[in-house]
Image (cartoon, rainbow, N blue to C red):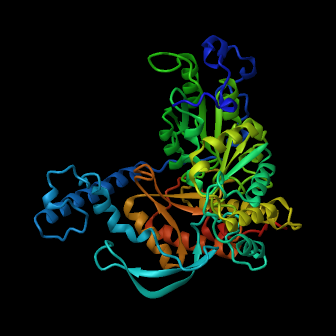
Amino acid sequence: MARTSDADLKPPSSQNGLKCDDLRKNSCHSKTEKNGPQTGVGSRQFSHDTFEQPPMYVAVMTYLGYGIVTLFGYLRDVLRAVGLEKCHVAQEREEQKDFTPLYQDFENFYTRNLYMRVRDNWNRPICSLPGPIFDLMERVSDDYNWTFRFTGRTIHNVINMGSYNYLGFAENNEDFLKTVAEKVRQYGAGVCSTRQEIGNLKIHEELEQLVADFIGVESSMIFGMGFATNSMNIPALVGKGCLIVSDELNHTSLILGARLSGATIRVFKHNNMHSLEKLLREAVCSGQPRTHRPWKKILIMVEGIYSMEGSVVRLPEIIALKKKYKAYLYLDEAHSIGAVGPSGRGVTELFNVNPADVDVMMGTFTKSFGAAGGYIAGRKELMEYLRSHSHSAVYASAMSPAITEQVMRAMKCIMGKDGTTEGIRRIRQLAENTRYFRAKLKDMGFIIYGDDDSPVVPVLLYMPGKVVAFAREMLKRKIGVVVVGFPATPITEARARFCLSASHTREMLDKVLQQMNEVGDLLCLKFSRRKRSAFPDACKGENTEADS
């Protein structure tokens, strides 16, 4: 059902009465820029976002690799059907064969025949703080990864290149965590109630005010789970008769929230302003299908930093299009808040745009702040509306007091309200580590995606066999990495995703780079056709620490 009472997100009734001729006559957008049509925004900010294409043989070998493993998958299914191989997968009971099946054989073909063979590369149990280094519990499988058993050994001092601990606040420094311990003594570990009942604590309201001050908006609202911040709040903002224009690489939480809303969804190509403007123009000119009535709301949904691509949103251009077509903008800053910008205030600060130009600002505390939960920020009227209409606000338990204090501690440190410069030092160190790591990987010949400012660094591996071999080889060298393949990525773009942290030292990064160079040569992963320098030169150079 559409929420027409949401005044702060409802556009003027004439927005979809605009004619195409009126749009073309908009004098504010008379110049065509290189990176976007008629947005009035220069292209300088976007020159560092790269998506290099591999040689043709890489794509051919990738498809061939998937074809071979699929062929062997069907062969193994035949062997299981005739009883020559034990079947570990869940199956329908014989007495229920006439029932509607709970398990679809074809749907879980990929899981049982491809994923299970390489499952040891995921869900690895750690047994220490997830800081720049961590400890892993060793496990082995006797049945090709259907089950695991622990050996009792611990793999110590593995360099952590996979956690979202951007500013290093996932730490166990006793001096830093004193206030968190005090809040546990004062309030306990949990609230056991929603904020609308008896779970609203003073520190919750203090954090909301702190978040609003940090971002530079009127008000904010916090939630106990980052994923639910998107999936449970988007249905409160739009509904039937509304249009969501979503980037094709948006996170699952945004996609789920859009689907739950009941609004019509249209997808534009990733960071492609031509594709976005085409959809907006069509939506304004044509209106809703069949009736051609104006859309009640048009909401553009994007992310600050895309977690699988490492690319940064083209925010100034999107804001220009949003104003031109009188739409609304929902910005997910889960990976960008705290991680980019001179003072860690996200992509609005990175591009020097007014936060008020973004109608709904969303972010999480699970990454840069070393905690859990998320927030929605914007106009005060919007927050008051969400407090009574958001499922996450009405039904979910309030944020843990200890988590609330941890977020406040980290945010005050970033803002300098703790009386130190530790927060700004970490922000600068993260930026330094990001630029250094990205530059060296490019010099070595790897294809990496994303923007130079993004601490998310995807290294393209492409072929399924190389993905598995890369993860296992890196763990042998005591480097923990995250590898991602189909269906989480396009079938030809499997990758390893590195996440940089301010807590990584130059020695750690140099060790990772050295091992990457060796593994890259061993597995033939250096697909870039750009000119590059030799690795010894790549790892040398002046140590330009951020705090120098």
- Could you tell me which quadrant the C terminus lies in? bottom right
**Residue 458 falls in which quadrant of the image?**
bottom right
Is residue 306 in sight in this rendering? no
Query: Would you place residue 356 above or below residue 74 in this image?
Result: above
Residue at x-position 68% and y-position 29%: 7
Query: Would you place residue 312 above or below residue 282 in this image?
Result: below
Q: Whole-percent x and y of residue 30?
A: 72, 20
Query: Would you place residue 535 above or below residue 356 in this image?
Result: below
Q: Residue furthest right?
A: 419
Q: Nearer the viewer, residue 167 or 224?
A: 224
Query: Would you place residue 499 above or below residue 98 in this image?
Result: below
Q: Answer left or right for 23 relative to 351.
A: left
Q: Residue furthest front?
A: 198
Residue at x-position 60% and y-position 52%: 310
Residue at x-position 61% and y-position 41%: 389
Q: Answer left or right for 88 relative to 436.
A: left
Is residue 142 in sight in this rendering? yes
Q: Nearer the viewer, residue 435 or 265?
A: 265
Q: Answer left or right for 523 relative to 19.
A: left
Q: Whole-percent x and y of residue 84?
A: 12, 70
Numbered marks: total: 0
Q: Nearer the viewer, residue 256 or 345?
A: 256
Q: Answer left or right for 370 relative to 95.
A: right
Q: Nearer the viewer, residue 186 or 452?
A: 186
Residue at x-position 20% and y-position 63%: 76
Q: Whole-percent x and y of residue 218?
A: 79, 42
Q: Residue furthest left?
A: 82
